[in-house]
Every structure is written in C-alpha cells, then in structure tokens.
Image: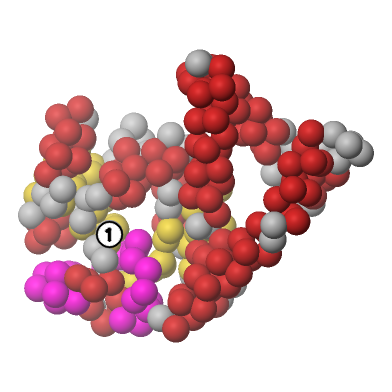
Amino acid sequence: MRLGYLGFGTIARACAEGLVNDGHDIVVSERSRANSSELAERFDNVTVADNQGVLDASDVVFVGSTAEQAEAMLSALRFREGQQVISFMVGISPEQVQDLVAPATFETLMIPFPSIASGGSPVLVFPASPTVEALYGGSNTVITMKSESDFNEFLAAQALLSVVAKSLAVGIDWLGRKTGSAHEAEKFLRLLIGGSIMAAPMETENAMADLVDSLNTPGGLNQQLREYMADRNTYDDLVQGIEVLSARLAEG
C-alpha cells in the first residue's frame, strides 16, 4: 500500500514507524525534518517529500496538522478522487475535513499514541475504518466509537496517561532519593505497576476495581496511601479535571 503522512511530528512518526516493516511504500512530509530524515535514512521504503509530493505518491493519506493550521495547509493542496484521508486532528469536524480534502474521501478520525510504534497500543477511531483496522489492528487494539460525543469522552479520559506517568515519576524520584538507586527504583515501579495493570486478560471486566480490592488489606500500606489521598479529595479533583476536558471538547 502507498501511505503518506502530512505533518510528521512525534505521533505521525510513531504511526509510520509501526508500519515500516509491513511492506508498504511510505512517504513522509519534510516538515519536522529531523524526524523525516532520520526515518528515511534507516528504511529504504521511506522517502521524504513536500506536502504535494506526499499526496501525489500516496493512496492513503494521514493528516497530522493542528486544527488551527489545517485550512491553510490543506486548501493549498490538490487531492485526487479515490484517495482515502485519515485525520489525527482534534478540534476539526469530519465534515470540515471532508470539505478541505475533496475530491478525496475522508475516512476516519484516528487518535494514536506513541506506543503504536512498537504495538500493543489502543487506537481510537470514529467512524469505523477498515483501513485503520487493516493497517494497525494486527499489532494494536483499534477501538471504534459509536458517536462523535463518545469519541470526545474517550479523548478526555486519555489525558489520564500523563497523570499516571507523572504520579509514577514522582514515586520514582522519591524512592531514588531515599535509596540512592534511581535506576532500580524506576525499574521496580514500572514492572510493579505495569505488570499489575496488564495481568488480567483484556476481556476481563472490572479488572481495575478487582485490583483495588486485592490491594485493600485492612491496615495495609496500599490501603493507607489510597485513603490518605481520598481524604484530600484527590480522586474527586481528578474527575473534575476530566470533566473540564470533556466540556472543552464538547464546545469544539
């Protein structure tokens, strides 16, 4: 398949890198030259072109611009009938994208994450996309939303990733300072938390609630820290923060 990436920041690069060994011809935007040049030097099936060159060489086009820059960038390009367009852009509706890329066909809004480069990542899409499923579904989990509003709620909730990562970084820093072994602290807590979260099969319902219950030994250390944070409204504040993001996305 001939794949093109307009805009080549961190996320677009991860998406391209996840497919480089699958036999596709990949052409990437010269925007973010460090990303595009480095990938092209490593892989013979990756080339670099200007934006129109990306379009001319591609049947499936991934658009990784920002919503604010999309109109200026896309309206200057010549799309062709039969091309499929997949957008990474938040804040611009599918209808707006379709207008900007006509006569090509907008297929889906796709939200990938950096771990898509190595596989095992969730991939959010709306509406359903056979193309995304075919390209990324083998090594990742494509999650199709029923509506644009559901898509926005999932998008708000994904911000938990940075909260969890920050919490883990704070714990690693504390343990490293206490013991003088930052590397061992990071290795231990990443294995502990990552392994515990992923221990139950993905088909398991209520896996996180069950994990909390299993860590609820009366008077235990896990219970004590969790209740300490609950007493300070940490979890209520977290829900309120997600609600703020949800409202922002609903406003468009």
Q: At which x and y percent is residue 123?
A: 49, 53
Mark 1 nearby-residue class (10 Å; few <14, some 14–19, many ≥20)? many
Please state which of residues 248 and 149 is positioned toward the viewer in this rendering.
248
Q: Can you say whether 200 is above or below 65 in the image? A: above
Looking at the rendered structure, the number of numbered marks drawn on it comes to: 1
Residue drawn at x 86%, y 41% as measured from the top left: 216
Using the rendered image of the protein, determine whether residue 219 is visible from the camera's viewpoint.
yes
Please state which of residues 165 and 153 is positioned toward the viewer in this rendering.
165
Q: Is residue 79 left or right of residue 223?
A: left
Boundaries of the magenta span: 71-96
Residue drawn at x 46%, y 77% as measured from the top left: 248
Residue 199 placement: quadrant:
top right
Q: At which x and y percent is residue 225?
A: 74, 42
- At mark 1, the secondary structure is loop
Residue, disc 1: 64
Q: Is residue 86 magenta?
A: yes
Q: Is residue 86 left or right of residue 48?
A: right
Q: At which x and y percent is residue 163?
A: 53, 50
Q: At which x and y percent is residue 132?
A: 43, 55
Residue drawn at x 56%, y 17% as measured from the top left: 179
Q: Can you say whether 106 is above or below 61 in the image? A: below
Quadrant location, the C terminus: bottom left
Q: Is residue 59 left or right of residue 238?
A: left
Q: Can you say whether 58 is above or below 116 in the image? A: below
Q: Is residue 163 left or right of residue 15?
A: right
Please state which of residues 102 and 75 is positioned toward the viewer in this rendering.
75
Q: Amino acid at mark 1?
A: Gly
Q: Can you say whether 38 is above or below 110 in the image? A: above
Q: Is residue 250 magenta?
A: no
Residue drawn at x 21%, y 30% as measured from the top left: 43
